[in-house]
Image: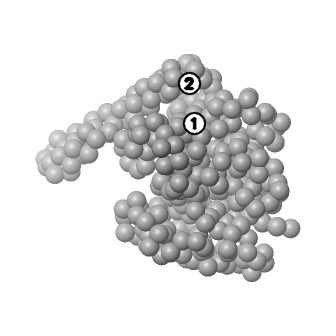
Amino acid sequence: MTISIGVDYTPEQWRVCGVDQGKPVELHTFATAGELLALVRQICALYPEPTIVVSLEVTTPFSALPALTDEQIDRLVRRYHPTQAFIEAREVLRSLRSMSMRSYCAPSVEYLPTVPLYRRLMRPALGTANEVCATVALLHHMREQDASWPEMNFFTVNASENGSCALVIKDGEIINGIGTLQGSSLPAAYRYLTELETAAGPENGKRRETFRRALSEAFWEGLTQELAGLIAIHHIEDIVVLGKESASLIERLADIYHVYLFPHAHTEREGYEAALGAALLAEGLEQDSSARDVVNRLQIRQADQAALVADL
């Protein structure tokens, strides 16, 4: 038995998935980096030098961790502005680098060679490494169901309380995306929130509730506008949804588009999409498995720093 490990990190939460021949055999959630590293050490003791892929909620190129210096790892995680998140992510990448020579950092959307240069210039964020890994899991599932690459034309929308990300998949390749790294994508929201936090008086609670409802409506209307724009450009109407707000998303969009819930096998759990995709990516990088086709189709190995300037 061999095992490949996928690690998905969002601040204050680590999810780990282990796969063997494309099937999940380990699913864990940890609150701290120390707990995560203890599990990985146990796995490395049983399966020396496992392939490990880390998926981060930031923009990163595809990187082999053993080839990175401490300073390069610091630059990879610099977008985690909260101090504790930065420290934990840095600690994990440095530790995994020493545990396995086959440890990698998954790429974010803008590093994929399948995304044209002009689309990388249009937006500050196209989608994090977590979104790429979730797509790996979805495409692998479809390949297991005997779907061909030309049949894979759809959007994926990951909607949570902190924002959303929409990716465009055409012929089984990620070609476009609209991403939000953290928090609201609405600049005006920060100004109103600051004013509310400094305001005093009995009316402040009512103002906060009004702001909360307005922010929710702004989120949904903004997402609807973004999807309408993508559909107008790409002429695709099938949407696969995931995330904590997926039920609300289906309710709002099902009358307009063909909306499908992200598929989960009986051995998988909701919320582990990125961790599972990272594990499948790890398996596809180093083994001749069903995941290799997906890794090659998305051109994961080519999604490094050079991909940003290859078209110039």
Element under label 1? strand
Residue at (53% x, 54% y) in the render: 306
Real-space CA distance between mark 2 and mark 1, rounded to the nearest whole angstrom: 10 Å
Q: Provide the residue designation for mark 1.
A: 175
CB within 8 Å, label 2 to label 1: yes
Q: Amino acid at mark 1?
A: Ile
Number of disc labels:
2
Quadrant of the rendering where the N terminus is positioned = bottom right
- The relative height of residue 312 versus residue 8 in the rendered view (above or below) is above
Q: Amino acid at mark 2?
A: His
Q: Is residue 205 left or right of residue 283?
A: left
Element under label 2? helix
- The relative height of residue 246 versus residue 286 in the rendered view (above or below) is above
- Badge 1: how crowded within 10 Å, few (<14), some, or many (20+)? many
Residue at (41% x, 40% y) in the render: 121
Q: Residue furthest front?
A: 312
Residue 310 point in image, percent of width and height: 53, 47
Q: Provide the residue designation for mark 2.
A: 234
Inspect this view and state whether residue 54 appears.
Answer: yes
- The relative height of residue 213 versus residue 254 in the rendered view (above or below) is below
Inspect this view and state whether residue 18 appears.
Answer: no
